[in-house]
Image: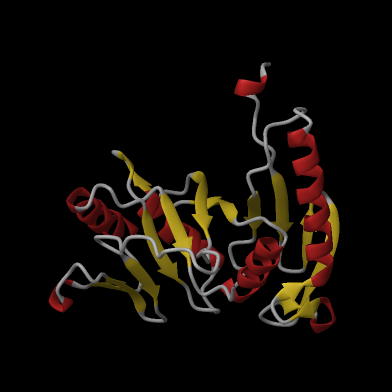
Amino acid sequence: MGRGSAIPQRVTLIADQRSVSVDGMTLATLQGEPPAFDEGDLRGHLVSPLYDVLVEKAAQAKDLGEAGKLPPFDGVLVLVIDGNTKFGVVRDIQYTASQAQFGDFVFVGVDPSGAKVGVPAALPTRAPPGTPPPPMPQLGLTVLIRESGLELVSPALPAEQDWTESLPLDYGALSARARSLHDRFPDEEHVVVVPQPETPLATLIAILAALHSDEKGTIFASPIIAGVVM
C-alpha cells in the first residue's frame, strides 16, 4: 500500500462506567453515582494519567509521521464511550486530550436509526494573540441542549424563527431543520452544540449524527462541542 492511500494514525480511547483506557491500557477509574473521575487523578478538568499517555502517543505519532513510516499526525482521537456516561466526564476527557494536542474527535456510537456511526466533532479553537478574527459565519447556528429539550438559535434568524424541540427528541425533525437551514446557507460547515454536564453521551451522539448528515448526505461537516473549558 502506497503512502498516499495509507490509513491515518488513530489513537482510540475506550471508557465504560468504571474506567478509561487508551489502546488497551487502563489509565483512570470512575467512581460514585453518577460516575466521575477520582479527584486524585484530576487537576481542574485535566485527568493526569490520561494526559501523560496521550502526550506520549502524540509524540510517537508525530515521529512516525515525520519519518514517513505513517501518515502525518492529525490530532484525531477516537472515542468509544458508554452511552450512559454524562457529558461532565466526556468534557474532562476532551479537555485533557486537547492539552495533549488531540483537538478533533470521532465519537463512535449509535445514530437515531440504531446504526453504528462515527461522528466527527471538534472543540472551539483559540487563535494566537494578534491574529485577525475570522469572518463571522452567515448562519452561526448553535444548538443548546436543555433539560427540557433542544433550542436552535442563530443571529441570522429572527427570534420568532428560533426552533425548539421538547423531550422526547424527534431526531428526524432535527435533521430536517438542519438540512433546511444548511440549504439556505450552503457554505456553512460548522454548528456549535452546547451540552449540559448531565447530558448522556448517547443523546449527544444522536444529536451530532442528526446535524451531521441525513439520507441526502452531509449537512454540517464539522460540528463543534462547546462547554469544554479551554
* Residue 142 seen by the camera: yes
Pick the quarter of the image with the N terminus: top right
The residue positioned 38% from the left and 74% from the top of the image is: 144
- Given residues 170 and 47, the one toward you in this image is 47
**Taking 26 as reference, is 32 above or below it?**
below
The residue positioned 83% from the left and 62% from the top of the image is: 52
Q: Report the side of 62 relative to 161 (left or right).
A: right
The part of the image, by quadrant, that contains residue 10 is top right
Q: Report the side of 36 relative to 74 (left or right).
A: right
The part of the image, by quadrant, that contains residue 97 is bottom right
Q: Position of residue 136 (x, y in %)?
A: 31, 63
* Residue 112 seen by the camera: no
Q: Position of residue 175 (x, y in %)?
A: 30, 54
The residue positioned 13% from the left and 77% from the top of the image is: 160
Q: Position of residue 155 (x, y in %)?
A: 23, 71
Q: Position of residue 207 (x, y in %)?
A: 41, 60
The part of the image, by quadrant, that contains residue 7 is top right
**Taking 210 as reference, is 215 above or below it?**
above
